[in-house]
Image (spheres, rainbow, N blue to C red):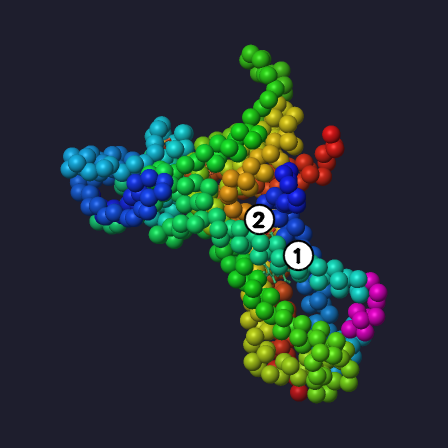
């Protein structure tokens, strides 16, 4: 395949992209499940227990690195693909393409960049505070004391709106991404693909709505 | 019918092109799109101008040479229809029609609306054939092939190599074309023998000649005049994967 040194074919890029993306999609489910415990109305008791488990379990510690790697690989390959593709038509059309069948697919890099910006904010809140780079929040005793921090942060409508918007864009990303990953893996079948597309849409909506009700809860119901 | 035409004119590969405006009167709705261009060219020639260059051969949808980008769609507004099979009755009277060449780094413009599609040729030369000497025609029943599979292989083999998939793709990816060619061989006994080398060589060549990467937007399927399905792209991805994973070292 490669003539000199290290080179990957276009299809290998797609496989890596899809594998990292699929892993991230699984991660989102477990992350959402944990976060929904915030809604239990018990002042964070169950949520804290879950966090405690996540922070102390060695397997989770390893998964944290895998997760980082997953994000980094997905983002780097995504940018590489985008740069390559934007140079593949040096002279554009006068009349814009009308042929696009899937609208979400055209804006993967854009929704991706929005998710990336959100990730930085998210890391600022959770990771860097945990590491002690930034001061603790009011009511928090340690950097791991997430519940007061969440409550405090979501009480801020600006942050909550940014949060919800980010998840709407993540929903757009996933709407295309779910079925796209199957296609990249070579799994396309006239019988199952329509069902995969429906499941992908449901998944995208559940993730976007599921994460979004948490700030809404803290904004309007919690005090 | 009367049309305003906005056509890309470019003297040669290195010249800087631009759009020229033409007004064409008395167009019959029965004319095919290429006949309309012939009609325009006749008038241009009569007034000592340089006719608009465009490619065509069979004019019946089988050779794949007539690709034009018309009002924002490769091969114009109709699905499953090549430019040569498109008729003027599909257009509204007294409107503007914008005609552009395929745009892709891998398909440079040679003149006016004619692009160099030899990048496809290079991909074919990298593996789009069967090496085995098949001898003279055998009895059709010597090698039994499931009817479903032979139909499927035929669905792939109807690709005419026109390049509309590349023109329609926001990434200028040639995956639909290459996957059709890979699949038509991979499904049949004669082609299976070299399936693994074929897919690797063709994909590597496809990347080398400068096509973009597939993003699964499926615009190609939408604009392919022959209705080639993106299922073949998935098939090629599988073929490629198995060529990487299940190949002996030798
Ligand atoms: C939790 C977050 C994310 C998940 C679950 C996710 C998931 C996915 C999946 C499954 C795909 C489909 C892969 C394929 O086409 O085979 C995809 C595509 C893509 N993602 Fe993400 N992604 C996430 C975050 C990001 C971020 C932060 C970026 C930033 C650059 C990004 C950029 C892209 C791009 C550019 C594509 C299209 C790749 C292509 O054209 O083939 N994604 N994503
Ligand atoms: S796949 Fe369709 S659009 Fe692409 S070259 Fe073949 S016939 Fe033309
Ligand atoms: S001229 Fe042959 S396909 Fe149109």
The residue tagged with tag 1: helix, strand or loop?
A: helix
Tell which quarter ligand 1 is in: bottom right
Q: Position of residue A12 (x, y in %)?
A: 63, 45
Q: Position of residue A48 (x, y in %)?
A: 78, 77
Residue B156 in view here: no
**Going 59% across and 73% down the picture, which residue do you hit?**
A163
Image quarter hosting the N terminus of chain A:
top right
Q: Nearer the viewer, residue A203 or A169?
A: A169
- Is the CB of the residue bearing disc 2 within 8 angstroms of ligand 1? no
**Going 83% across and 70% down the picture, which residue do you hit?**
A56
Q: Nearer the viewer, residue B114 or B208?
A: B208
Q: Position of residue A51 (x, y in %)?
A: 78, 73
Residue range corresponding to the magenta coloring: A51-59
Image quarter hosting the C terminus of chain A:
bottom right
Residue located beneath label 1 in the image: A73
Residue located beneath label 2 in the image: A194
Residue A37 in view here: yes
Picture quadrant of residue A115:
bottom right
Q: Nearer the viewer, residue A67 or B104?
A: B104
Of marks 1 and 2, which one's residue comes earlier in the chain? 1
Mark 1 and mark 2 in contact? Answer it, CB < 8 Å.
Answer: no
Vertical side of A140 occupied by B71: above or below: above
């Amino acid at each position: 395949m490669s003539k000199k040194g290290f080179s990957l074919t276009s299809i290998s890029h797609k496989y890596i992209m899809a594998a990292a993306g699929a892993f991230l999609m699984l991660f989102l489910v477990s992350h959402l499940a944990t976060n929904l415990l915030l809604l239990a109305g018990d002042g964070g008791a169950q949520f804290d227990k879950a966090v405690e488990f996540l922070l102390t379990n060695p397997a989770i510690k390893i998964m944290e690195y895998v997760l980082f790697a997953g994000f980094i690989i997905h983002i780097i390959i995504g940018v590489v693909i985008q740069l390559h593709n934007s140079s593949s038509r040096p002279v554009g059309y006068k009349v814009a393409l009308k042929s696009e069948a899937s609208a979400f697919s055209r804006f993967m890099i854009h929704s991706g960049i929005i998710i990336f910006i959100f990730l930085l904010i998210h890391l600022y809140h959770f990771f860097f505070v945990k590491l002690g780079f930034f001061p603790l929040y009011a009511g928090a005793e340690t950097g791991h004391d997430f519940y007061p921090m969440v409550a405090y942060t979501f009480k801020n409508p600006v942050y909550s709106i940014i949060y919800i918007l980010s998840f709407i864009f993540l929903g757009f990303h996933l709407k295309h991404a779910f079925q796209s990953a199957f296609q990249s893996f070579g799994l396309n079948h006239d019988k199952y693909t329509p069902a995969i597309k429906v499941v992908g849409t449901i998944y995208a909506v559940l993730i976007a709505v599921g994460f979004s009700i948490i700030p809404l809860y803290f904004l309007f119901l919690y005090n | 019918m009367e049309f305003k035409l906005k056509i890309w004119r470019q003297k040669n590969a290195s010249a800087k092109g631009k759009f020229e405006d033409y007004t064409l009167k008395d167009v019959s709705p029965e004319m095919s799109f290429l006949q309309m261009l012939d009609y325009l060219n006749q008038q241009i020639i009569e007034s000592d101008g340089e006719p608009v260059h465009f490619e065509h051969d069979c004019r019946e949808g089988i050779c794949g040479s007539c690709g034009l980008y018309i009002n924002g769609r490769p091969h114009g507004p109709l699905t499953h229809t090549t430019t040569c099979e498109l008729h003027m009755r599909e257009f509204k009277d007294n409107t503007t029609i914008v005609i552009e060449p395929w745009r892709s780094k891998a398909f440079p413009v040679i003149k006016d609306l004619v692009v160099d599609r030899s990048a496809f040729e290079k991909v074919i030369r990298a593996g789009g054939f069967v090496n085995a000497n098949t001898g003279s025609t055998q009895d059709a029943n010597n090698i039994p092939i499931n009817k479903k599979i032979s139909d499927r292989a035929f669905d792939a083999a109807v690709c005419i190599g026109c390049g509309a998939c590349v023109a329609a793709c926001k990434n200028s990816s040639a995956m639909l074309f290459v996957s059709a060619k890979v699949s038509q061989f991979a499904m049949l006994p004669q082609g299976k023998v070299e399936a693994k080398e074929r897919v690797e060589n063709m994909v590597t060549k496809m990347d080398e000649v400068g096509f973009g990467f597939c993003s699964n937007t499926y615009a190609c399927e939408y604009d392919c005049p022959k209705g080639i399905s993106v299922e073949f792209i998935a098939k090629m991805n599988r073929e490629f994967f198995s060529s990487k994973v299940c190949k002996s070292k030798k």
